[in-house]
Amino acid sequence: MNPTRSAARGLRHTWTIPLLLAVITMLGLLSALLGEQLGWKVVAWVALMVPVATSIWYARWKRT
């Protein structure tokens, strides 16, 4: 296997979840700031709970 290809695969593996969490967090923050209706507030709450729930799950998973 090509070393460059292996390095790219390692970077993709390392940064996929953090980038996904960043995008979800930005969606939550923007919907909270710009949305006025109840639907936007629900989207904001759900989107902002995803990183919190992920952190709690990861902390519990790493402990066991």
Image (cartoon, rainbow, N blue to C red):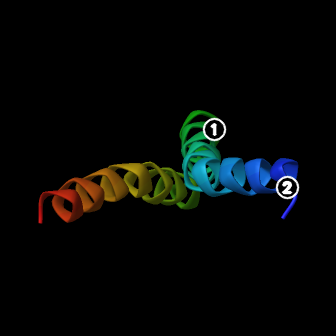
For marks 1 and 2 on the same chain, the one whose residue lies earlier in the sequence: 2
In the displayed orientation, state which residue is furthest to the left: 64
In the picture provided, is 38 more to the left or to the right than 20? Answer: left
- Residue furthest to the top in view is 33
Amino acid on which the number 1 mark rests in the picture: Leu
Q: Secondary structure at mark 2?
A: helix
Is disc 2 surrounded by few (<14), some (14 to 19) or many (20+) residues within 10 Å? Answer: few
Residue in front for this viewpoint, 27 or 41: 27
Circle 1 crowding by C-alpha within 10 Å: few under 14, some 14–19, many from 20: some
Q: Position of residue 1 (x, y in %)?
A: 84, 65
Q: Answer above or below: position of 26 versus 58.
A: above
Rendered location of residue 45, percent (x, y): 42, 53
- Indicate the quadrant where residue 60 lies: bottom left
Residues 41 and 56: in front is 56
The residue drawn where x is 61% and y is 40% is: 26
Position of 13 with respect to 42 (left or right) is right
Whole-percent x, y for residue 34 in the image:
65, 36
Amino acid type, residue under disc 2 in the picture: Arg
Please identify, in this view, whether the residue under mark 1 or under mark 2 is nearer the observer: 2
Q: Are marks 1 and 2 in contact (CB under 8 Å)?
A: no
**Dot 1: what SS?**
helix
| Labelled disc at residue 5 | 2
Determine the residue positioned at 22% across, 64% down: 61
> Is residue 3 or residue 30 the one in the foreground?
3
Residue drawn where x is 86% and y is 47% of the image: 4
Residue under circle 1? 30
Tell me the residue at 74%/57% (across/down).
9
Give residue 6's position: percent from left, percent from top: 76, 56
